[in-house]
Image (cartoon, coloured by chain):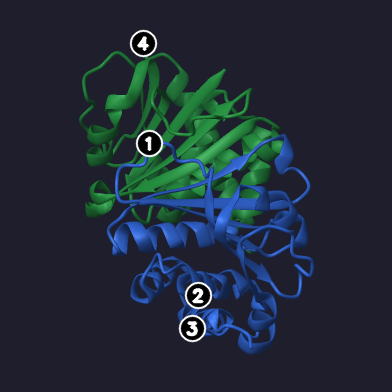
Chain colours: A blue, B green
Amino acid sequence: MRYEARLSGEGGQGLILAGVILAEAVGIYDGKNVTQSQSYGPESRGGKSKSEVIISDEEIDYPKATRVDLLLSLTQESCNEYVKDLKEGGHLVVDATYVPSIPPGSFQVYQVPMIQIAREEIGKEIVANIVALGVITEISGIVTREAIKKAVLARVPKGTEALNTRALEAGFAAGRTAMVPKV
Amino acid sequence: MRYEARLSGEGGQGLILAGVILAEAVGIYDGKNVTQSQSYGPESRGGKSKSEVIISDEEIDYPKATRVDLLLSLTQESCNEYVKDLKEGGHLVVDATYVPSIPPGSFQVYQVPMIQIAREEIGKEIVANIVALGVITEISGIVTREAIKKAVLARVPKGTEALNTRALEAGFAAGRTAMVPKV
């Protein structure tokens, strides 16, 4: 078993922190092998941001995503750029507001208004990354709700625990809603 | 050219953030290819923490450290565990207080009281990771002082810029002192 998740968007959206939290949830609290990474190079100019989490039952020899199981994109530009490595039948989770145009391909698409939920329901756009973690938890099935909650609480700034818990739970709810087949 | 840095210690010492800052300094501000990663697995229980930064002139195909150029260790346990991958002639940068016992091997050893500097000179032990970044900048020569300063300021919480700048500069000074051959 190998599972590759790629979290993409732009700088300032907290995607490295989201990747670290997801990795710690799976690695420390769920006890699997995980590598979390980000790369920078000439292509990292221009504000795109990408964070990867690779989960495996065995030791991870090659910690770079090559056949992505789940791609999160919070911006259209990052979606366009990184969708190429999403595997057939993989999960594409996009922000419903900021990724209006879904690239063609045979994957399952989930359009979730994560940034709007953070801004309007929770009252802080900055927790959109935590809302996204809730959504990913539900859609991926790769981490338990219990583990992700512990990992979030261990990483967020003191005094923001309640806010981030609400963001995570709003993400769980939005993820479950997105998984209900549309009639 | 490939350069591998491994930052080790225990959870809560801010070594993932230090790795991210070093990677962003080199990748975004100095314009090289960089991958930053951390792994979790059965061995990650027990509080050890390790963050890796790999820098290259070319695209990084294998983003896992195998022949480490510089190992930072803020605890004795992490030093004992991770020194095995330090290459011959590599740089071992240890906290002078918390790593009293230097493992045998043919590498250059720098004993710097980073945690003590953070606690006593800066007044906040929590900035020991930023002091360490200053020390690493001087000893490694792999990143410019200008780039690491920009990267630190882009990542630390608002309102702590002056504190972290002082910590970084104290690290520069301590790194230079550690490089002066002892008579």
Name the quadrant of the C terminus of chain B.
Answer: top left
- Residue under the point 67% across and 60% down: A12
Q: How far apart are marks 3 and 4 (CA)?
A: 61 Å
- Mark earlier in primary sequence (2, 1): 1
**Dot 1 falls on which chain?**
A
Q: Is A73 situated left or right of A179 in this image?
A: right
**Dot 4 falls on which chain?**
B
Q: Is B148 situated left or right of A60 in this image?
A: right
- The quarter of the picture where residue B73 lies is top left
- Residue under the point 51% across and 82% down: A176
Dot 3 and dot 1 residues touching (CB under 8 Å): no
* Closest to the observer, A151 or B151: A151
Q: Which mark is residue A169?
A: 3
The count of marks equals: 4
**Dot 2 falls on which chain?**
A
For label 3, the crowd category at 10 Å Cα-Cα, with few meaning under 14, some 14 to 19 and many 20 or more, is some
Of marks 4 and 1, the one in the foreground: 1
Of marks 2 and 1, the one in the foreground: 1
Q: How far apart are marks 3 and 2 (CA)?
A: 6 Å
Q: Is residue A96 above or below residue A120?
A: above
Q: Residue A61 carries which label?
A: 1
Image location of residue B173, percent across then percent down = 53, 32
Image location of residue B75, percent across then percent down = 28, 42
